[in-house]
Image (spheres, helix red, strand yellow):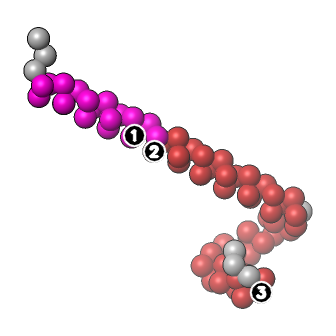
Amino acid sequence: MVSKLERERSALAAAEKDLEERRQKLAELEREEAERELNRLIKKVGQDTAIALLELAVKVKPKVAISALEKLGGKV
């Protein structure tokens, strides 16, 4: 016969496993959403322009580039 303490430990372990799986699924969904948003924006400006913008952002530093873009066209 399994004691109440052992049942609680088992239930807690199952809940922790479920929580970890849900966190992983959420991270995957967030990654997919970011990828869709990136694809949408690339389609909007064109692939060559997007590449040029990213190359310039790397040269300038990403935070500075984001700040400049936010000033020009709203929240990025």
Dominant secondary structure of the residues highlighted in magenta in the image: helix
Q: Do the residues labelled 3 and 1 touch (CB within 8 Å)?
A: no
Residue receiving disc 2: 23
Q: Which numbered tag is attached to residue 10?
A: none
Residue 72 numbered tag: 3
Q: Where is residue 73 in the image (x, y as percent from the top left)?
A: 78, 82
Give neighbour class at mark 1: few <14, some 14-19, many 20+ (Cα, 10 Å): few
Amino acid found under the numbered disc labelled 2: Arg
Query: How far is mark 2 from mark 1, CA to CA?
Result: 5 Å
Q: Name the residue under label 1.
A: 20
Q: Which amino acid does label 3 sit on?
A: Leu
Q: Residue at 39% across / 40% down in the picture? A: 19
Residue segment shown in magenta = 4-22
Check disc 3 and report its element: helix, strand or loop: helix
Residue at x 73% of width, y 58% of height: 37
Neighbor class of circle 3 (other Cα within 10 Å; few <14, some 14-19, many 20+) is few
- The residue at 79%/55% (across/down) is 39
Q: Which residue lies furthest to the top in this view?
A: 1
Q: Is residue 14 visible?
A: yes
Q: What amino acid is found at the position of numbered circle 1 in the picture?
A: Glu
Q: Based on the displayed image, in which of its 4 quarters is residue 8 positioned?
A: top left
Hey, which quadrant is residue 66 in on the image? bottom right
* In front: label 2 or label 3: 2
